Amino acid sequence: MPTLTAARNAVGLTFFLNGLVFASWVSRIPEVRSSFDLTNGQLGLVLLAIALGSVLALPTTGAAINAMGTVRIVRIGAGAATLGMVAAAIGLGDLLPLTVVGLFVYGLGIGVWDVAMNVEGAEVERGLQRTIMPRFHAGFSGGTVVGALLGVLLIELGVPALVHLVGIVLLAIVLVWRTSPSFLPVVERHEERAPSAARAWLEPRTLLIGVMVLALAMTEGTANDWLAVALVDGHDVSHAVGVAGFAVFVLAMTAGRFAGTGLIDRFGRVAVLWGTMALAGAGVLLIVLAEQPALVVVGIVLWGVGASLGFPVGMSAAADDPVRAASRVSVVSTIGYAAFLAGPPLLGFVGDEVGTLKALLVVAVLLMPAALVVPAAREQRGVRSGQPVG
């Protein structure tokens, strides 16, 4: 029987590796545009392949976890992500269709991997009886920091994208395969009372949490896909400096997730989310409007901190009831990933019209209506004891 400590460590590493793979890909996005000579709109359509794969995989992942458990599902997700990334890297610069298909398969895998690790993280959080999900997501952010910085270094050294990306995904799948058996047996504990996964799509609170995560995922995802490109285009910096700006963003997001656990336990989810959303909006405005490099860096930091808690808090809120955690996390993830489906082409086409940098203002606009649905994530009674909630 896995111990709580072993499960916590395994989940933390799984989040870290997910972020490492993702940021390694992000570090090569400007290269995708230049190597295929794409416009911003065309690049957005290429990036859409990842989100499309994830959105197609997510609705059934909760049911698959109930049937097979988180260990098998996270392994399947990591395996598909590895296969897709290898194909995308082989096609980069020469075979655009292969790169697009590879990114689609990568999206399938990363979506499955994401739901499984969040369901397991919620189980560990319940066992510890304190807020820890933001720290798991800080592990993801830490992986993105390492991935982004490593990407900067390898780009400067002239290491080919194929060598870089294939090496990262192979390392990740080996480690996921070795550590995932330490996960807690989520399904076995609750399977006799688990309801139909389809019912979660009819629950108002679950849907509102999904809408909140949609907007906040857009806040985070826009930086992942477009910040480096926007800095290159709008502030006339080099590719490496643009990727370094993305590294600053994920470093700030990591710090926000570590600090957020204590803040949430003290002030509650709603107040903390409102505060971080205000920081994100202010950060985007500084990046777009400021001309001094120092103020742009401040804006990146504010945006990173502001984007840090939306997704992890949404996952915790969806998993408040352990009996329905897998189904609800699957639903909320599916809605949230629609941001990654709509975000890349939306920002790309807006960028073609007004410029990549000014297109980031879409994020600030979306944060205002998103604030209205944040109360849906309020803590539910019974979450710490493991008793079912409505």
Image: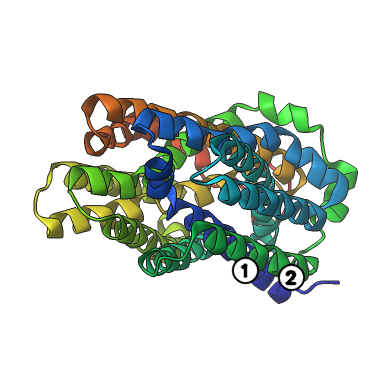
Q: Amino acid at mark 2?
A: Thr
Q: Of callouts 2 and 1, which one flags the residue occurring earlier in the amino acid sequence?
A: 1
Label 2 residue SS: helix
In x, y percent, where is residue 19?
Answer: 53, 59
| Residue beneath the point at 79% across and 58% down | 71
How far apart, in angstroms, are the residues tagged by discs 2 and 1? Answer: 8 Å
**Mark 1 is on which residue type?**
Leu
Nearer to us in this view, 221 or 204: 221
Q: With 11 as the anchor, is 135 left or right in this view?
A: left
Q: On screen, 213 above or below 143?
A: above
Question: Quick check: 240 left or right of 104?
Answer: left
Seen from the viewer's position, the closer of residues 103 and 132 is 103
Question: Observer-nearest residue: 383 or 282?
Answer: 282
* Residue 343 shows up from this direction: no
Is 372 drawn above or below residue 66 in the view shown? Answer: above
- Kindly check if marks 2 and 1 are in contact, taking CB atoms under 8 A apart as contact: yes
* Residue 161 locus on image (x, y percent): 50, 57
Check disc 2 and report the residue beneath it: 179
Quadrant of the rendered image containing residue 251: bottom left
Q: How is the image coloured?
A: rainbow
Q: Which residue matches tag 1?
A: 13
